[in-house]
Amino acid sequence: MKRPARPITATYLRNAAAFYLERYPATAEGLRRVLARRVARAVRNDAPVMEGVEQEIEAIVARFVAAGMIDDEAFAQTKARALHRRGTSTRLTRRRLQLAGVDAETLDRAFAGLDRELDTDPAERERRAAVALARRRRLGPFRLPEQRRERRDRDLAAMARAGFDLDLARRVIDAPSAESLDDD
């Protein structure tokens, strides 16, 4: 037997928000989406929904932001750092963070903070990310020597799909050795 849907109240929304933030880092927009999905599910299941639910969601998000539990800039910088280490391009990182609800101005500040933290400029940060991706996926100079020539086009395509421009991808894939990439 299907359990009846819980009514959407202010207390329910606050508890759902707190529970979500305990488990996942989120942006203000991300939390709004989570709470809106809960409300939509309740509506589909014919559960009672309080009056002014949209305003209540906004108030809950504002309280969590004011309390410091949601910080879009810190979220963006932490996520950008993690994606950079994995070898994600700036272009793809920006897109992922935009989808998470981070605005362009916050993204710019987060990338500037990341450049300060890494003591580098955007072009060097992008090069390091490309090398990290090649190392992680064993592309180009990280392949066995006998496989490099026959897999070159596939490696370039993988770099392009990851959001790196063709010139940078060629420099990384065509590097004479993995050690030469560290010296760049």
Image: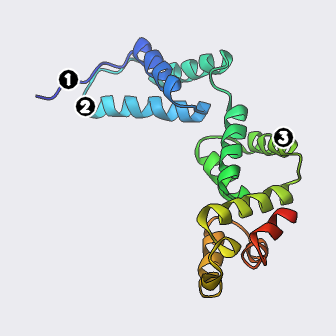
Q: Which class describes the residues within 10 Å of circle 1: few (<14), some (14-19), or many (20+)?
A: few
- Amino acid under disc 3: Glu
- The correct choice, above or below, for 163 with respect to 151 in the image is above
Compare residues 67 and 125 and report the one nearer the observer: 125
Image position of 93 with respect to 5: above or below: below
Is 142 above or below relative to 153?
above
Image quadrant holding the N terminus, namely top left
- In the picture, which quadrant includes the C terminus? bottom right
The residue at the point 68 percent across, 75 percent down is: 140
Relative placement, left or right, of 173 versus 96 is: right
Q: Is residue 122 left or right of residue 156?
A: right
Q: Position of residue 33 (x, y in %)?
A: 50, 35
Picture coordinates of residue 102 (x, y %)?
Answer: 66, 40
Q: Residues within 10 Å of mark 3 (few under 14, many from 20)?
A: few
Judged by depth in the image, the label closer to the viewer, 2 or 3, is: 3
Where residue 21 is drawn, which disc sits there?
none
Q: Which residue is labeled 3 in the image? A: 117
Q: Secondary structure at mark 2?
A: loop
Name the residue: 74% across, 45% down: 104
Q: Position of residue 95 (x, y in %)?
A: 64, 53
Choose between 94 and 37: the one closer to the eye.
94
**Residue 120 at x, y percent in the picture:** 88, 50
Picture quarter containing residue 44?
top left
Dots 1 and 3: beta carbons under 8 Å?
A: no
Say which residue label 2 marks.
Answer: 45
Contact check, label 2 and label 1, Cβ < 8 Å: yes
How many numbered badges does the structure rendering display?
A: 3
